[in-house]
Image (spheres, rainbow, N blue to C red):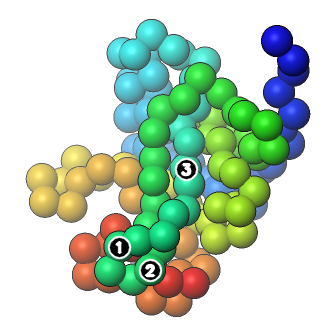
Amino acid sequence: MSAVNYKTGNEKLIKVLDGASQHLNALLKKQGRPDGALRIAVVGGGCSGLQYKMDLTDGPRDRDILVRSNEVNVVIDPKSALFVAGSELDYSDDLQQGGFKVSNPNAQVTCSCGESFAA
């Protein structure tokens, strides 16, 4: 198997806040992959045109950007990185609006549910 060709980024791309770090570490440990990562992608859809897609992964794929922030790994493909640069990732236990939340300075329009945006 060939080596994965990825780049290393920093918190200027995305910064993981304490709540997200703690929750992500717990999820990765529960799944038996403590060295895994959260993949964040921006895809078309949602009521504002773009939305975030997040899932757990074992690590970066070819051309991904790997960011280590607050003791966790985040992987982002280069196209999505253009949309999330400068963002912060947090986590909320709120019953109605809970889950991982991206605070994105590039979002010019966001929907009321907070799940989609336009850049």
95 relative to 114, above or below: above
Instruction: Identify the disc placed on residue 49.
Output: 2
Q: Which mark is residue 40?
A: 3
Q: Residue at x 51, y 63 (%)?
A: 43
Neighbourhood count class around disc 3 (C-alpha, 10 Å): few under 14, some 14–19, many 20 upward: some
Could you tell me if residue 96 is visible in this image?
yes
Q: Amino acid at mark 1?
A: Gly
12 and 116: which one is in front?
116
Q: Nearer the viewer, residue 107 or 18?
A: 107
How many other residues sit within 10 Å of disc 1, few (<14), some (14-19) or many (≥20)?
A: some
Query: Which of the two labelled residues, at mark 3 and mark 2, occupies the earlier sequence position?
Result: 3
Q: Position of residue 75 (x, y in %)?
A: 65, 42
Q: Quadrant of residue 12?
A: bottom right
Q: Nearer the viewer, mark 3 or mark 1?
A: 1
Residue 80 lies left or right of residue 113; in this view the side is right
Residue 46 is labelled as: 1
Say left or right for 92 vs 13.
Answer: left
> Horizontal and vertical percent for residue 90?
43, 53
In terms of secondary structure, where does tag 3 sit?
strand
Locate residue 2, reporting x and y percent: 87, 18
Using the numbered discs, state the Cα–Cα distance from disc 3 to disc 1 in whole angstroms.
Answer: 16 Å
Disc on res. 111:
none
Q: Are marks 1 and 2 in contact (CB under 8 Å)?
A: yes
Count all numbered tags in the image, as a single digit. Answer: 3
Residue at screen point 62% across, 53% down: 15
Quick check: 29 left or right of 82? left
